[in-house]
Image (cartoon, coloured by chain):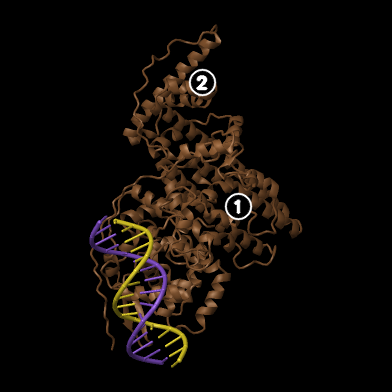
Chain colours: A brown, B purple, C yellow
Amino acid sequence: MMVESASETIRSTPSSQNGVGSLANQPDGGGGGGGGGREGAASGEPNGEMSPVELLHFQQQQALQVARQFLLQQATGLSSPGGNDAKQPAVQVPVSVAMMSPQMITPQQMQQILSPPQLQALLQQQQAIMLQQLQEYYKKQQEQLHLQLLTQQQAGKQQPKEPLGNKQLAFQQQLLQMQQLQQQHLLNLQRQGLVSLQPGQGTVPLQTLPQAVCPSDLQQLWKEVTATQPVEDSIKQEGLDLTTNTSNSTSFSAAKVSPPISHHSLPNGQSAMHTPRRDSSSHEDNPGSHPLYGHGECKWPGCETLCEDLGQFVKHLNTEHALDDRSTAQCRVQMQVVQQLEIQLAKESERLQAMMAHLHMRPSEPKPFSQPLNLVSSATLSKSTSDTFPDGLPHPPTSATAPITPLRQGPSVISSSTLHNVGPIRRRNSEKFCTPISSELAQNHEFYKNADVRPPFTYASLIRQAILETPDRQLTLNEIYNWFTRMFAYFRRNTATWKNAVRHNLSLHKCFVRVENVKGAVWTVDEHEYQKRRPPKMTGSPTLVKNMISGLGYGALNASYQAALAESNFPLLNSPTMINTSSASGMLHVGHDDVSSTVEQVNSNGSNSPRLSPQQYSHPVHVKEEPAEAEDDSRPVSLMATTNQNVTIPDDRDLEEELPVEDLS
DNA sequence: AAACTTTTAAACAGGG
DNA sequence: GCCCTGTTTAAAAGTT
C-alpha cells in the first residue's frame, strides 16, 4: 500500500501576467511631440543660373517637401495597414533625397528644418534603405560564394580529394563568416537603434522604396557600419585555419567572449559588449584604459562620441550613459547580441566539427565548443544564483554590482557564473510564456545536450516533458533522471542536487502522479493538474517580445530573439543559414502560437490518453532509446555515452519532427 | 508589500 | 549499512 500524502499546497490560480511591454530596445523615450515644421514649401524650378547658395536652399526646400510627403504617407500608411504596399512615386522620390540629402544639407540644417518626428521618420527611411541595400549586398556576396563553392565542387570531382576538402571548407568558412558578418551587422544596426523602428514604420518605406543606392554608397555604408567591429579584420588575419576547430569560424566572438571569463565580472555584460566589437581589444587590455573607450571615442553602442582622454571619457560615460532606461535598454540589446553570438557560436562550432569529421580532417572531438560555452553556463550548480541569465538586466551598470550578486556562490566557479549573475533572475521565464518547452527543446536540442547550460525551464516542466516524450507517458524516477542527463549537459553534474530537486518536484506537484506498477512505481503527468497551475492568460506579442527579451535564456534566446527580430520586420533575417525565411516566419508562428494557445495547454484536452498535439508530441515514438522497462540497468550509461558523441543523428530526427522550424542546419 | 512559485538543502522513512 | 525512492519542511530568491 502506499500513502499518497499529497502535500496540498495551495494552488490558487496565479495572477495573470499583464503585458507591460516596455520594449527594451526602444532606446528613446519617444515622447517628443514637437510641432510640425511650417516652413513654406519650395516652389519653382531650379534655374540653371542658380547660385550655389540658392541651389543649396532649393535642395533644402525640396528635401523638406519630400520629408513632409513622406511623413504624410507614413501617417496614412500607419492608419491604413492595407495601403502599405501601394505607394506612389511620391514616396520614391525621398529615397534619393534621403540618401543624398545628408551630403547636401548638413545634419544641423536638417535638424533645424525638420521637427524631431520628421527627422526621425527620415532617419528611419534612410535606415530602411540602408538595411535593404545591405541585404542585397549580402545576398550577392553569398550567391557568389555559393557559386564558387559549386564550381569548386564540380572541379573537385575530377581531382584528388585532399585539396578539395580544404577548398570546400574554406568556402564554407567564408560563407559562414559571411553570414556571421551579416548577422553582426544586423545586430550592430539594431544596437545603434535602427531596430527600434516601429514595425509599421519600418516596413512602409522599406517595401516601397526603390533601391537607389549605388555600389559605392553601399560600400561606404558598409564601411561605416563595420567600422565598429573587427570581424573583417579577424577574418583576414586569421585566415582559414581549420585546425583550431573551435574558434576559427567564429573567432570574432569565440576568442573574445570565452576566455575573458575573468573580466566578466563587469556588470551587465558590458565587457562582452565591447569585446567582440573592436579590433582594438588589445588596447583595451591595457590598464588605465576603459573597455568602452578606444580610438579616442566612446564605444558605447551607437555613441562614438569623441573624447580626448580617459578622464573626459569617464565623464562622458557618467553623464551620457548613466543608469537610465535608455542605457539599460541598450545593455539589454547588447546582451542579446552576445547571447545570440554565443549560441550561434555553439551551433557553428558543432557544424564545423561535423564537417571536419565528415571530411576526415581530423578526429572529431566530443564537444569542441563546450569550452567557450562554458563561459555561458559553467555556472555550475553553484546554486540558485549561478544559473540565472541576464535578464532583468543590470542592476546598476556600475562595476560595483557584479561582484555583489553572488549571494550564495557555491564552490569555486567564479566568474563564469558572474556573467549570468548579472541579474538574479529565474530561468523559468521563457518556459512560462514564450517558447513551449518542447519546441524550445527541439530547436536547441543539440545545444542543451552539449552545452553546459542550464535550460530555462522549471523542473516541473522538464519532468513533464520527459514523461510526455515517452510512448506510455510514464517514467520511473530513474528514467527521468536519465532523460535529464541525456538531454542536458547541465544535468550531468551535481547530480545530487538536481535529483533531489526532481524528486522534490515529483512529490510536491499534484500534477505528477505516482502509479504503482508491477515493476515498481512510475510517474505520470496529470495534464489537467499541470494546466491548472499555469495561467492561460497570454497577452499579445508585446508581452511576448518583452518576455523574450527579458526572459530568454540560453537557447531560448535563439528562437525568441529571432522571433523578436522578425517581428520588427527585419529584412536581413532572410539570410539563408542564420535564419532562413521560413524559419524566421516560423519563429513568429511559434511565438504567436504560444501566446494564443500555449501549445502545451492544448494537450490537456479531457480525453484520457490524449495523443497530444501532433506537432508537439508526435515524436515520442522515436524516443525508443529509452526502454520503458529496462530501468537503471546498463542502458542509461551507454545511452549517455552514445548521445554525447553522436550528437547528431537522433536529434535531427527529433528536430524535424518537432518543428518545421529549424535553425540549426 | 504580500502572496505565490521555484529552487535548493536537508531530514527522515521505507524497501531492497 | 548503504543506496534509492519518496515525502516533508524550510529558507531563499524571484515573480506577479
Q: Position of residue A206 (x, y in %)?
A: 45, 35
| Circle nearer the N terminus (1, 2) | 2
Q: Secondary structure at mark 2?
A: loop
Binning the other alpha carbons within 10 Å of mark 2 as few (below 14), some (14 to 19) or many (20 upward) gives some
Binning the other alpha carbons within 10 Å of mark 1 as few (below 14), some (14 to 19) or many (20 upward) gives many
Quarter residue A436 falls in: bottom left
Vertical arrangement, residue A414 with respect to residue B12, above or below: above
Image quarter (top left, top right, bottom left or bottom right) of the N terminus of chain A: bottom left
Q: Which residue is mark 2?
A: A105
The one nearer the camera, A490 or A265, is: A265
| Amino acid bearing label 2 | Ile
Q: Secondary structure at mark 1?
A: helix
- Mark 1 or mark 2, whichever is nearer to me: 1
Q: How many marks on residues? A: 2
A281 relative position to A210: left or right: right
| Amino acid bearing label 1 | Lys
Disc 2: host chain: A
Label 1 in the same subunit as label 2 = yes
A382 relative position to A244: left or right: left
Q: Is residue A555 visible?
A: yes
Residue occupying the point 28% across, 51% down? A18
Q: Position of residue A414 (x, y in %)?
A: 53, 62
Q: Residue furthest right?
A: A160
The one nearer the camera, A604 or A113, is: A113
Quarter residue A195 falls in: top left
Q: Which residue is mark 1?
A: A256
